[in-house]
Image (tube, rainbow, N blue to C red):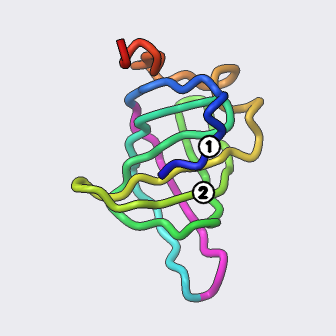
Amino acid sequence: MPTQDRNEARFACLDLCDFRWSRTVAADPEGSEFAILLEIWHSGGLFQTSNAVPEHSTVTIVTGNGSVKGEVRSCEQDDYGFLVEVRVAEPQIWFPRAYQPAYLLHRNRLAA
């Protein structure tokens, strides 16, 4: 279950991002892959990955507008891989000021 603040406006989106994570403890794996950004909000996003990413791992998300660091808040397996929720460290260089996915839809419109 995603843990982000429900008061933030959420947007469904679709974008491919270079997604890299580093371990927080020696036993955790490090890795990188292209992840699908499924949802975005001011302080974070929800990514679909093919690998599990340990909670509290530091991540670097690389988009067409540069990179932003964050922390994994949760990682849950689903039928297609893993849903990884990330809280970004510097929201001012994230959404919507510095980065906007090409495909974006306000979540309230999906409920109608």
Say the numbered circle drawn on residue 4.
1
At 75% from the left edge and 46% from the top edge, which residue is drawn?
A: 89
Residue lying at the far left of the rendered structure? 79
Q: Position of residue 43 (x, y in %)?
A: 68, 37
CA distance separating discs 2 and 1: 8 Å
Q: Is residue 20 magenta-colored?
A: yes
Looking at the magenta stretch, what is its main secondary structure?
Answer: strand
Q: Residue at x 53, y 32 (%)?
A: 40
**Does residue 107 lie above or below 48 as drawn?**
above
Q: How many marks?
A: 2
Rendered residue at 62%/87% (across/down): 26
Please say if 79 is above or below 38: below
Q: Is residue 25 magenta?
A: yes
Which residue is denoted by mark 2 in the rendering?
73
Residue stretch in magenta = 15-26
The vertical placement of 81 against 38, above or below, is below
- For the residue pair 64 and 68, the one nearer the viewer reads as 68
Residue 12 spot, x, y in % from top left: 42, 26
From the viewer's perspective, tell me whether residue 70 is left or right of residue 48: right
